[in-house]
Amino acid sequence: MIESFDIRERAEAVERTSLSTWAALSGESKGRDRYEDPDPIRTAFQQDRDRLLHADVFLRLAGTTQSFVPAEPTAQVLDVVPPWRSRLAHSLATSQLARTIARALRLNEDLAEAVALGQSVGAPPFGVAGEHALAEVATAGFDVGEQSLRVVERLVRDGRGLNLTWEVRDGLLHQTWPRSHAATHEGQVAALSTWVAGSLHDLTGALRGELVHLDDVPAEVRTGLGAGHGTRVAAVVTSAVQASAERPEIALTPPVEAALGTLEAFLDERVHGRPEARAEAGRAAHCLQSLAIEGATNPESLPGRDGDVTEQRVLDHLCRLTDREARSAFTERFLPRG
């Protein structure tokens, strides 16, 4: 009969013998801020993945938008399938894309998945529009990676945090792409995956909502990535594997990277840059910035510890809200009730 502690040790041994020399090994993690006895069954990165997956701050992402663009649905399918994804749906899709790339490169899938799942736990309401709004009012600007790290280290579990491994926390902090500065290949894979998933899902949503048509998409994108969502995902995965195998950093092949850049510019102009989208983003910014000013004026109304800087307490409070909660708070505080 196999003792339970042998399961984790066997998994760590499999990692040592089967993963790439560039992979992060769970048995050689730099550890946690507070020591914990090893789990008898799960590796350290599996534990981190599970802690993030079951945290309230992760489940909250079901109520926040990933890309805050109003659609004008005309296709009947939209009655069943909404065109714009929540942060939760985006995070789950990102984590699976990260696992696929990590497995193909013989990297640590559990670490890549954990970083991908946690990248948005510090995101404010209203998607990218909300991020830009807070960046304009915060003295030091606003970075989702920094806020996500603060959430998992200091805010959840009554300030005790999730006590994640160093490798996961490093990946959360360095999530921008291109060329993530994450110390691990897995963190870089997660950064690439969240960028790719965002662009590809925005295109799918725009096509489904009939804001654009496939013929409108630049030929470079249709040729380099494909005409269907599955084809585009496969093209990116293949590109990442070809460009990154046995190399010191994660990359894409030049044609696919160029096609994604063209797609991003196209979405900025034809989808996010539409007058309706800009107007809605402006309303979202007004909502959050008004709540930020009100919180700074009345810090006693904010949750959190009195010793924290007021501006940080404001950001922490706003980043706990869902889109609906932010709208409700704005209505309660600033609209007449007559």
Image (cartoon, grey):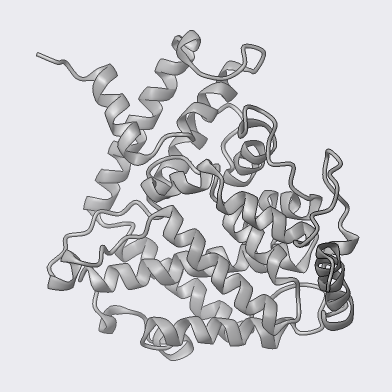
Task: Name the residue: 51% across, 36% down.
Answer: 135
The quarter of the image holding the C terminus is top left
Q: Position of residue 238 (x, y in %)?
A: 60, 87
Residue visible at 25% across and 67% down in the picture: 81
Residue found at the very far front of the displayed protein: 1
Residue 218 in the figure: left or right of residue 80: right
Q: State the residue at coordinates (83%, 80%).
A: 20
Quarter holding residue 104: bottom right
Q: Position of residue 306 (x, y in %)?
A: 62, 11
Q: Quadrant of residue 46?
A: bottom right
Give the image location of residue 126, x and y in percent: 37, 44
Quadrant assignment, res 82:
bottom left
Asked if residue 114 shows in the view, the reply is yes
Against 168, is 55 above or below? above
Residue in the foreground of this view, choosing between 153 and 264: 153
Camera-nearest residue between 75 and 320: 320
Does 23 appear above or below 221? Answer: above
The residue sitting at the bottom extreme is 223
Q: Residue at x 66, y 42 (%)?
A: 149
**Image-based side of 326 in relation to 72, left or right:** right
Image coordinates of residue 205 in percent, x first then y, are: 31, 68
Total label count? 0
Pick the residue in front: 313 or 26: 26
Q: Quadrant of the N terminus?
A: bottom right
Can the viewer see residue 179? no
Considering only vertical position in the picture, is 146 above or below 333?
A: below
